Image (spheres, rainbow, N blue to C red):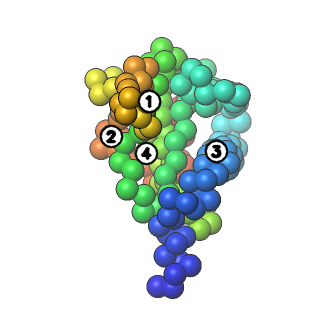
Amino acid sequence: MDQLATNLNHPPKSSPHSLDSGLREQAIGHLFLGQLLAHMWCTDARDIEVLKAEVDRSGYDLVLESRGIIRHVQLKSRFRGSTVNEIDVSTKLLGKPGGCVIWIEFDPGNFELLKFYWFGGPAGTALPDLGDRVSRHSKANSLGEKTERPGLRVVSKGRFQVLTAIQEVANNLFG
């Protein structure tokens, strides 16, 4: 495999995927919404509403509603080959109707959405328990301590259900 292909499949820490992660997250979110809305359209489920949070302050990025079911959705992403196996989830999401987390795995070379990791309950139910593992800041304070982030819980990839198609995501969201 040539060096370019290797770099695209396993981006180094100084790659655009790290340096411009906010832009990457926005792009992945738009691609996800495009696929979801296209699927809903093609299956004659056109009563979907999408609200986008300007600030990720309450633990969610999107509010989706269809067929009377409301979902507060936290979107996360990881590129294929990433070694990241856990994410931080806000405890505030527990108090939101239909809270869920969708962790999207994508191809770093072309942004193709490859699979979805689902953490949530059935349509119309609350987010499952996040567990007791409190997140810590990634950078140490002036005393060299990585302090706790009490409003966040660490959730491992093993607790997520793997979905391979947007149809499965729509079914988990809205039944």
Residue 117, disc = 4
Q: Amino acid at mark 3?
A: Gly
Residue behind mark 2: 156
Mark 2 neighbour density, 10 Å: few (under 14) some (14–19) many (20 or more): some
Out of 28 and 66, give the one closest to the viewer.
28
- Residue 164 location (% of width, % of height): 45, 54
Q: Amino acid at mark 1?
A: Ser
Q: Earlier in the sequence, mark 1 or mark 3?
A: 3
- Residue 42 location (% of width, % of height): 68, 48
Q: Are the residues at dot 4 and dot 2 in contact (C-beta closer than 8 Å)? A: no
Q: CA distance from mark 3 to mark 4?
A: 20 Å
Which residue shows up at 55% across the image and 38% down it?
Answer: 75
Residue 142, disc = 1
Q: Nearer the viewer, mark 3 or mark 4?
A: 3
Residue behind mark 3: 22
Q: CA distance from mark 2 to mark 3?
A: 22 Å
Asked whether residue 27 appears in the rendered view, the answer is yes
Q: Amino acid at mark 4?
A: Tyr
